[in-house]
Image (cartoon, grey):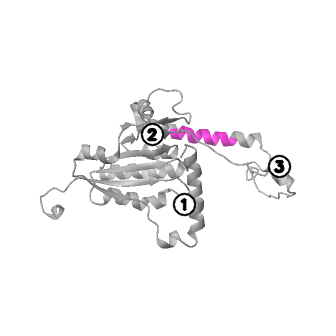
Amino acid sequence: MKRFIPFVKSEPTVNVVRLQGAISNSGSGLDDPSLAPVIEKAFTKGKPDAVALQVNCPGGSPVQSSLIAARIQRLAEEKDVPVYAFVEDVAASGGYWLACAADEIYVDQGSIVGSIGVISAGFGLTEAIDKIGVERRVHTAGKSKSMLDPFKPLVPADVKRLKGWLEDLHTIFIDYVKCQRGGKLVDKPDLFTGEVFIGQNGVDVGLVDGVEHLVPFMKAKFGDKVQFRKFGQRKSLLQRVGARVVAEAMGSVEDRIAFSRFGF
């Protein structure tokens, strides 16, 4: 009842947003539309003293990464609320992009961070289609509409064009990290090559601010009576069963594949 008594200051509050899983544009992982109401509530409910991000993310869609991070930064500025990120197993690639939305980033001694790069992966099925005797029939208007068709041999011009896109995205990623981390970054040749850094190594190169855990850090900052409110994506019963089962099962497989790149 203390918080309802006039002129009596309530205990400090930290609202915690969990960002768990791969970042996806398929609707089965982390994306801006599904996280928007979660993030909005975290910055507005109960007038928090801070917002903490629990990040456990191996990466994913660069655009969704940018949209989610921009929403966090925009609300932090509007509500004048500091943001702290706490990395669990991994904040790599797009996951590190999300962590950079915070004012400060902290890790466990075994956390993996970094992987500042862009990747495009697929399969070539040219020989497979020949072996099973299937004829590929594709009709287009526009010479680039069938670019990088997995059932056709690679065209050098198409590969060059794709690499140009990846370089553009990589530059955007690097500029964002430099903007967010500023003078904290160490001049290290492999910092932006897609290399990953573990725990204290991430601190040493300036990608993160220290080795800390969420609860003790916040208690040291706001006192032992600090209260935590948790916010995360919720799924209705209909989303957990029926037509969504297959989609979510595939999303789980995608998550496992993404995390497996880092040994998890």
Instruction: Provide the residue designation for mark 1.
Output: 28
Q: Nearer the viewer, residue 92 or 97?
A: 92
Q: Which mark is residue 127?
A: 3
In the image, 166 versus 227, the foreground residue is 227
Of the 4 image quadrants, the one containing the N terminus is bottom left
CB contact under 8 Å: marks 1 and 2: no
Q: Secondary structure at mark 3?
A: helix
Whether 196 is drawn above or below 86: the answer is above
Residue 84 on image: x %, y %: 35, 45
Q: Position of residue 257 (x, y in %)?
A: 59, 50
- Residue farthest along the right direction in this orientation: 133
Residue under pointer 2: 110
Give me the residue at 37% from left, 38% from top: 211
Which amino acid, mark 3?
Glu
Queried whether the magenta region covers residue 162, the answer comes back as yes
Q: Please give the range of residues in magenta.
A: 161-173
Is residue 9 in view from this perspective? yes
Q: Residues within 10 Å of mark 2 (few under 14, many from 20)?
A: some
SS of the residue under disc 1: loop
Q: Residues within 10 Å of mark 3 (few under 14, many from 20)?
A: few
Q: Which mark is residue 64?
A: none
Residue at 56 percent across and 33 percent down: it is 193
